[in-house]
Image (cartoon, coloured by chain):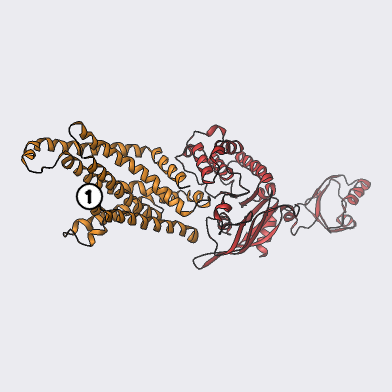
Chain colours: A orange, B red
Amino acid sequence: MILTIAHKEFRSLFAAPSTWLMLGALQLIFAWFFLARLDAFLQLQAQLAQLANAPGATQAVAVPLFGTIALIMMMLVPAFTMRLLAEERRNQTMALLMTAPVSSTHIVLGKFFGLLLFLLLIVAGCLAMTLALAAGTQPDIGLLLGNALGLLLLAASYAALGLYISSLTAQPVVAAIAALGSLFALWLVEISTVDNDHAWRMIAPTSHFQSFNIGLLHSADFVYFALFCATFLLLTIRRVHNNRIYG
Amino acid sequence: MSAATPITLSARNLCRRFGQREVIHGISLELKHGEVLGLLGHNGAGKSTTLQMLTGALLPHSGQIEICGFDLARQPGQAKSRIGFLPETPPLYRDMSVDNYLAFAAKLHRVPRPQLANAVAEAKRRCGLQDTGRKIIGTLSKGYQQRIGIAQAIIHSPEVIILDEPTVGLDPSQIRDIRALIRELGDAHSVILSTHLLSEVESLCDRVEIMHHGRLIYSDSSAHMQQYGHQPGFIVTLLNPPLLGELQAIDGVQQVEPLSSTQFRVLHAADAKPGPALLALAAQHGWQAQQLVPLQSRLEDVFVQITENQ
């Protein structure tokens, strides 16, 4: 049942022309950043070569690119999560799911994984672009994969938060703005703490992405993302179930 | 209906509050196989809330619902796969094609994958949607969208079909088509139909329940409902009428009321049959009887009478 709903969500994303437009525009933006970074790297290459332990192409080009994409994700994910439940409520299509033999858990997980599959597509697009470095040099595949994994986990946590906010309202636009605001607030928490080990910093998903970004696979970060997703998915499930109680 | 007919849906003592306001007060319902039940009521009487509770979209505060013997609260999966529901607004994804939407609805209702194509084709055939398969739902007219809503409710051949005002907003020919479809569905499934159109009840339903302020206040077969508070009588047209007294004197006649110079309303006791005697006299005395129409109370009047009595 989760698969059925996920499949439907995934397909309905592609039914809207705006999705294609957004995918195209994203690739264009990523390519722009990628080429600008590459250009800068080529100009500095000679000077870098004189340094001891100089950063390679992967570190100088791909890593900052993933950092930028992580920020773009913050604005991108709410645009997709806003529809998930708010629009079902507004168009009164929720009744189909509520009266079908599926539980609230199925509905929420189906929608979450449907969107995650789509986000995976975007992450895969970035990964493929950075792998193009292989044409000129030997990229650090491990670092690239670690970054892609981090990006996917980050996007998943954003999706879980966005899904929860979408379940609170019947207006997709309100859901989008509220989700963007929350993600922005979390990001501000991270950048406003100067101290690297500050406890506040730990609550921001972006700070946990940092370790993936520098090539560190820290089990605490995996646990953080898993807990973050689980918390908001559970809250969403409760919220959807409450629909049956409060009408 | 024989006593051996299985009961497909039974609800006992359903109560529902919204905040402090209790909107449904202890409703009990039973539905037998092959029966079409009409749920009548004014706007805001609690029809839609009741139907939402019967389909599991809304939890009752107290009471119990069983679908084909499965408790809706304890075995929701089993119970819900035996219900098809068309809410007031058909739950349609406007950007999907008809085929994709119906296939999704079928999968949600656990139609096994090998039978999926058949189920979609059959539902489309029954609802007259054969030529709309690849069209996008949002581009279709209201009548077609309503039919897709019904197709979605019957796609898994559920035992119980619940339709909330299925003919609202349709043109007369579409209403006729959908009523024919509901009548056909009523043979093999049990149907609950909520409506405020009394003609719909008259033409479709075996049984009527009237809801008023969250209570069921009347329950009977729709034929019986028409007899409710009904005074037997007829309207007779006599082109050459006698004096009123002569009509009054006929055995069994309780009251004669002239409607025009040639038309008279004759009321009589339920067991008396003064009609033939009147016609015999008319022939004998040359009253030139032309028409004798039995009085029939309209369902509208009966409905108003029943709800006002409460």
Which of the 4 quarters of the picture holds residue A225? Answer: bottom left
How busy is the neighbourhood of tag 1: few (under 14 within 10 Å), some, or many (20 plus)?
some
Residue shown at 57%/47% (left/top)?
A: B168
Residue found at the very far bottom of the displayed protein: B20
Q: Amino acid at mark 1?
A: Leu
Residue A8, position in %: x, y?
44, 42
Residue A155, position in %: x, y?
31, 48
- Is B83 rendered above or below residue B255? above
Q: How many marks?
A: 1
Q: Is residue B192 visible?
A: yes
Q: Out of B120 and A197, give the one closest to the viewer.
A: A197
Residue B44, position in %: x, y?
56, 58
* Chain ID, mark 1: A
Left or right for A54, reference B77: left
Quadrant that contains the C terminus of chain B: bottom right
Which residue position holds label 1? A216
Residue found at the very far right of the displayed protein: B284
Q: Out of A66 and A26, give the one closest to the viewer.
A: A66
Q: Is residue B41 visible?
A: no
Left or right for B178, reference A212: right
Q: Out of A2 and B34, give the one closest to the viewer.
A: A2
Left or right for B216, reference B16: right
Q: Out of B42 and A2, give the one closest to the viewer.
A: A2
Q: Secondary structure at mark 1?
A: loop
Which of the 4 quarters of the picture holds residue B176? Answer: top right
